[in-house]
Image (cartoon, rainbow, N blue to C red):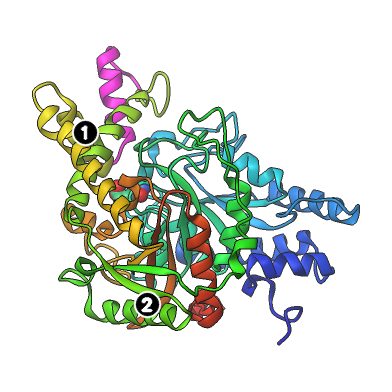
Amino acid sequence: MSDTQREMHAQSMSELAAGLDRGDFTSVELTRSLLDRIGKLDEKLNAFITVTAEAALDAAARADKARAAGEGDVLNGLPIVHKDIFCTRGVKTSCGSKMLNNFISPYDAAVVEKLAGAGAVVLGKSNMDEFAMGSSNETSYFGPVKNPWDLSCSPGGSSGGSAAAVAARLAPAATGTDTGGSIRQPAALTGTVGIKPTYGRVSRYGMIAFASSLDQAGVITRTAEDAARLLGVMAGFDERDSTSIDQPVPDYIGALKESLKGLRVGIVRQHFDEGLDEACGVTVKDAIAVLESLGATTVEVDLPNLDLSVPTYYVVAPAECSSNLSRFDGVRFGHRAENAEDLLDLYCRSRGEGFGDEVKRRIMTGTYVLSAGYYDAYYLKAQQVRHLIADDFKQAFAAVDVIVGPTAPSPAFKLGDKMDDPITMYLNDIYTIGANLAGLPAMSIPCGFVDGLPVGLHLVGAHFAEETLLRCSHQYQQATDWHTACPEDFR
Ligand code: GLN
């Protein structure tokens, strides 16, 4: 079948861009067809919190007009979805929480602004774990998201709505955020591509903060090429984010073509030790063999402090979240309890009613590790270990260009399976958290199936080596077709 005959929803963003350019369809037609699919199929998935149909069709009409006039930027008329953590002007921005269920943002996040500026059409806001805390999308106030590959399984989290929407062909791309793995782990569990750029590469302005020193915005797509296209628009300096880094944005698409000859790929032995599902391990090793056949050489690298990354993260992230979430008190921000007796009662009840269990658990842990008397033993210690982990990566990147391994310890797990056991849930991010602690760019791409469920290959690069990750992924996708697989009920 030629591209023009393939159904619109089956096409990648780059294919859709070409289709729009050729005049095979208009953005209004494309947008309408995806809105129809969302209307028909999302009740199975619960991937959306809000669908912005009217605004999407208006934006699509504007994009068609611009195209007809020979104008329009790189994303002109292309549909996307935003994780509901990004502030969107005039639209509910809930962050997956009852606390913000009534919040209509008065302004756009930098990411939202930039993508709209390049012509993207926003279909709606995707479901997510409450305040991005979770690995299964089950902590959302709006109910769990289902995995399109098996509706009884989790799509991962916290960007599970974004990942499910892209995997089920309800949208070609979606934004996400990643504090400890929330773009990459759901990408792995749904057979999509997810990239978390270097800390500071994309502005966090207007992205509701969870753990500010770890949070980064990124995208979920079906191809590395689409990720490159979107990242090129999203990346760049923003004076409204004091941690944004002023570095030129490279031509990510231009960099994709270069071969992998001579690329030094690091393999971490501990990644394949106990804890990893055996069949997943085999799948990941097969993917590494493909990279070798494309000209890459593999080198074993050591990350001696890697096993400390999960405990370190679960001190740093709760500490920062306890501070960030203190603003939701029912007075300045968020849900307000009714009939409070006094101010303290208002604070306590508003927070008690507005936050779910996992968020409360994190706030309590965070408050504890920051409290006088425990600060040195926990928070300071965690920051020191964080430096050791970052140093391990620095040493490793003296010898290799990219580190590859599994994204998650297993394929998608059943909804409900891990909810009563936070520690097992936290271990889901064992391979992804290191990149956040060290501020490094990292990516997950589909590399096979185990028992009919997708498996992800994880790639980590040195600071600002997004080009290497994208190129490596693109070359892998030129040689394989895992990324083209589509769950049966969503073809
Ligand atoms: N699963 C991790 C957590 O629960 C990471 C979440 C994220 O990256 N936002 O904190």
Q: Nearer the viewer, residue 255 or 342?
A: 255
Q: Going 40% across and 53% down the picture, which residue do you hit?
A: 462
Q: Which residue is mark 1?
A: 366
| x and y, in percent, of residue 220 in the image | 51, 59
> Is residue 349 inside the magenta stretch?
yes
Quarter of the image where the C terminus is located: bottom right
| x and y, in percent, of residue 70 in the image | 89, 54
**Rendered position, 394 above or below 416:** above
Please tell me whether mark 1 sits on a helix, a strand or a loop.
helix
Q: Would you say residue 438 is visible in this rendering? A: yes
| x and y, in percent, of residue 5 in the image | 74, 81
Q: Amino acid at mark 2?
A: Ile
Please tell me whether mark 2 sits on a helix, a strand or a loop.
helix
Residue 172: which quarter of the image? Answer: bottom right
Quarter of the image where the N terminus is located: bottom right
Q: Decide: marks 2, 1 in contact (CB < 8 A)?
A: no
Q: Which residue is mark 2?
A: 288
How crowded is the residue under tag 1: few (<14 C-alpha within 10 Å), some, or many (20+)? many
Q: Would you say residue 147 is visible in this rendering? A: no
Is 11 situated left or right of 318 in this image? right
Q: Earlier in the sequence, mark 2 or mark 1?
A: 2
> Which residue appears farthest toward the bottom when viewing the image?
1
